Amino acid sequence: MTSALIAQGSEIRSFNGWRSRDTFNRMSKNQRTNSVPRGMTCRGVHRAIIEHLLKSRQNLTSSTMLDIPCGSGELISSLRRFFPGADVRGCDLKKPEALASGEFSSVDASRPFTVFPGNKFDYIFSVSGVMEFDNTLQFFESCHTHLRDGGQFVVTNDNVVAIRDRISYFCLGKVRQYHLFVTLRQGSWKVIPIHNMLRILQDAGFRIREVQYVSLLPKDWLMLPLALLVYPIQFLYMNLSRSRIPWREQRAIYPFRSLLCRHYIIFCQKGFID
């Protein structure tokens, strides 16, 4: 893999281990993952996370894991099913039925938090959460503090650069899945494009390991003709942009698949990657 150069102000940080997945067949042939519930996110996101952990070929049965915000607990149930023995806990405003009182901590993720004092986690998952509260950098920094050195952070978010979103923004002034007007106590409201998300993660001290686009529904293929027209223009623009980010990483952030998929997953690690 090539070394990545990520600009932070006037500083350029280098790290190894960047990987991208831009082929259309994301899932392995492991039939066990067919029954992974969708949960409160886009279709296939939870399954992709489980697949990624299974492919890592690590013994996770003794791992400590935290899901924040955990919603109704579907991801926690899936993690326990595939990795029995793992210590899986959750945080949110309201405790899901799947968790006992000692396995849950009530948290307002928009504010600094400390949960399960004395515990450091091997994995922290934040699935479809960052679009629902503010202070994203502060949230990532709190997650970073709760990870052990070398621990992994998995964050997912809506993809807002797909062709459907570009058409929606051109015609309506908004991306597809978000409202034009934002009201108090509205659920999903904060739009974070992937390039901003990557920068915030790096500012919080994380190293990016992999970007994966998921959730490609049959009706999304209707956008394929337009995607085939748009991507050469975007490809040329990236090639001429003179960015300090290496070419391989530019393509990992904006592969052709990004024009069709509804969601993306970023796999990060605390500390430097060997």
Image (cartoon, grey):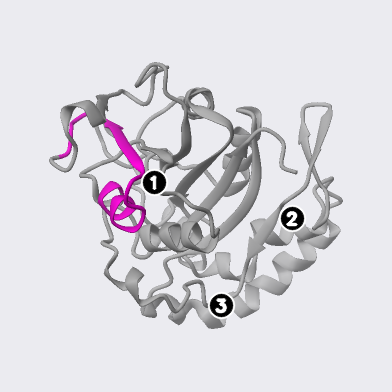
Q: Secondary structure at mark 1?
A: loop
Q: Secondary structure at mark 2?
A: helix
What residue would you read off at disc 1?
127
Per the rendered image, the range of residues in magenta is 76-96
Report the mark closest to the observer, 2 or 3: 2
Nearer-N-terminus badge (2/1): 1
Q: Is residue 80 left or right of residue 154?
A: left
Examine the image and state in which quarter residue 225 appears. Answer: bottom right
Examine the image and state in which quarter residue 109 appears. Answer: top left
Q: Is residue 18 left or right of residue 127?
A: right
Q: Position of residue 71 (x, y in %)?
A: 25, 41
Q: Position of residue 155 (x, y in %)?
A: 48, 44
Q: Which image quarter holds the N terminus? A: bottom right
Q: Is residue 14 magenta?
A: no
What residue would you read off at disc 3?
226
Q: Secondary structure at mark 3?
A: helix
The answer to whether mark 3 and mark 1 are in CB contact below 8 A is: no
Q: Is residue 86 magenta?
A: yes
Q: Amino acid at mark 2?
A: Glu
What residue would you read off at disc 2?
249
Q: Is residue 219 visible?
A: yes
Number of labels in the image equals: 3
Q: Residues within 10 Å of mark 1 (few under 14, many from 20)?
A: many
Q: Nearer the viewer, residue 119 or 95?
A: 119
Which label belongs to residue 61?
none
